[in-house]
Amino acid sequence: MSANSSDHNSHNEGMNAIIPLPPAEIHLWLAFYDEITGERLLSDYWALLNAAEKEQQKRFYFAKDRLRYLVTRALVRTVLSRYELIDPREWVFSTNAYGCPEIANAQAREARLWFNISHTDSLIVLGVTKHRALGVDVENFRAREVSIDIADRYFAPAEVADLSGVPPHQQQYRFFEYWTFKESYIKARGMGLSLPLDKFSFHYPHDRAVKIAIDPELADDAARWQFWQFQPRPEYLVAICAERIGDQPMTLTVRQAVPMQSEKFFIPEFLRISR
C-alpha cells in the first residue's frame, strides 16, 4: 500500500472509534514507513509531536531515520488513542529505571494500558494490551547481516550449540529466530539489556513450537510467558512475548496501518507458538 497526498482523503470510516481491548487480547499494529510519502500526511504527523519529539526528529542525519521516527511517534500516539479517550497530542511518556518507555497519563495507567514498539529497516511494529506485560521485536534479516560470533558472546550454550549445527545457509535465519525471541522477552520484562542474554534460552521441540528455559538467577517462571513468531513479509521476522494472566487463552490480532489514513486486518501465519 502506498500512501501519498492524492489519497490522503481516503480516510476509513471508524478509524477514530475506540477499539475494545479485553484483557485476553493482544493487538499488533504494522506500519511500513517507506511507503508513507505524502507531504500533507507527514505534516499532520508533525503536528502531533511534542516539542521534545520535534527536536529529536531533527537530530537524525539521514532522511530515512527522520521518516521512521516521525511515523513511529504518529503511530504510537494515534493507536493509543484508539484504546483511551485521549487526544493523540496529549499522550505523555516516561521511562522506567531501565530506560524503557512507559505511558505517564493517569487515565491510561489506571486502565493498565501497556504498549511496546520495535522497528527495523522499513517496518514499525507496535503491540498494545491491557493488564499484562508485553514485548515485541522485529528484524529485517535480509537487510541486516550479522556475524554468528555474536551468539558465542551473548547466547546461552544450548543456543550456541544448536546454531552451530544448522547448515551455514540457514544460520542467519536461525540467529534472528533466537534474537527476536530474546529481545521480546527482555522487553516484556522491562529491563532491557540489563538482563543477561545467556541466562535464558529458547528451544524448538518441533518446527512450529518454541519453549523458554530461564536460569533461577533471573527469578522468573517460564510458564508465565506466551510467545509467537511470524513473518509479515518474507524478509521480516516478528516475535511477541506476553505475560499470561490466569488460565484464559490469549488471542493476537494484527492490523496494518498508515496512521490517520488507512488500516486493515492482517492475518498472520504463525511460524512458532509456545504452548
Image (spheres, rainbow, N blue to C red):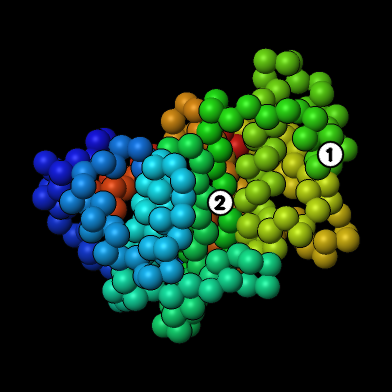
Q: Which residue is drawn at 34% across and 76% down?
A: 90
Q: Depth check: give the residue in front, 70 or 216.
A: 70
Q: Residue at x 50, y 28 (%)?
A: 235
Task: Pick the quarter of the image with the N terminus.
Answer: top left
Q: Nearer the viewer, mark 2 or mark 1?
A: 1
Return the residue at label 1.
153
Number of numbered markers = 2
Q: For the residues labelled 2 and 1, say whether their Cβ atoms are less than 8 Å apart.
A: no
Q: Which residue is drawn at 52% across and 50% down?
A: 118
Give the vertical position of 207 relative to 212 (above or below).
Answer: above
Distance Cα–Cα, label 2 vs label 1: 23 Å
Query: What residue type is disc 2 on?
Result: Val
Query: What residue type is disc 1 on?
Result: Arg
Query: Does residue 28 appear anywhere in the picture?
Result: no
Return the residue at label 2.
136
| Residue 115 image position (x, y, % from top left) | 49, 63
Crowd class of label 1 (few under 14; some 14 to 19; many from 20; radius 10 Å): few
| Residue 247 image position (x, y, % from top left) | 60, 63
Quadrant of residue 203 within the rendered picture: top right
Quadrant of residue 2 within the rendered picture: top left
Crowd class of label 2 (few under 14; some 14 to 19; many from 20; radius 10 Å): many
Give left or right: position of 226 versus 58.
Answer: right
Q: Depth check: give the residue in front, 275 or 92.
A: 92
| Residue 216 image position (x, y, % from top left) | 88, 59
